[in-house]
Amino acid sequence: MATIDDVGDRDGWRCWLCDKPVDGDMSVNDPRGPSIDARITKKKAKKKSKDVVERLAHRDCNTGKGNTEAVIEWGEDLFIVDPAVIIPSVERLTRKGGREAMGRCPTREDADAASEWLLDRLSRLEPSMSFETRIEPGGGQYLLILST
């Protein structure tokens, strides 16, 4: 089992759930203090694997999530219609490859912003994977597609 410092250094001292900075000098008893979340993917849970991905999280983010599937929220400033749920989409791409439609945007600028945000977020969520986005116009909207 890794220490908080090991996991924090690896994750760049950012909470994997809310993507905000974590202060490693705060008390682990403080709600914004560091904690380690043992993330188990559905695939690993089905196999009953002992391999667990340890990720850095704020104590209150980790406690608030409890023993449920984590949800990564899209950025508040993004304009996306029918956004995909990020973690299951990423898990499918990690397992099978291919591409996933992540949402529709009303303008090219909105699609570019969503694409940039998503790639940045995924670089910390799944640092071992390399993702690409593509924006396809159609029907007066822009479809954001994520692929491996």
Image (cartoon, grey):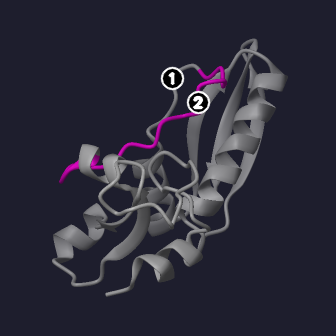
Q: What's the residue type where badge 1 is placed?
A: Asp
Q: Is residue 45 above or below residue 68?
A: below
User: How many C-alpha atoms fall within 10 Å of the one at disc 2: few (<14), some, or many (≥20)?
Assistant: some
- State yes or no: discs 1 and 2 in contact (Cβ < 8 Å): yes
Q: Residue 49: where, in percent of width, then height?
A: 21, 82
Residue 111 sits in quarter: top right
Residue occupied by mark 1 = 82
Query: Over which residues does the magenta segment extend?
Result: 65-80
On-image quarter of the N terminus: bottom left
Front-lying residue, 70 or 29? 29
Q: Report if residue 51 lies within the magenta region.
A: no
Q: Is residue 148 among what the camera can see?
A: no
Residue 64 sits in quarter: top left
Give the left or right position of residue 18, taking residue 63 as reference.
right
Magenta: main secondary structure:
loop
Residue shown at 49% from the left, 56% from the top: 15
Q: CA distance from mark 1 to mark 2?
A: 5 Å
Going from N to C along the chain, the mark reached first, 1 or 2, is 1
The label shown at residue 103 is 2
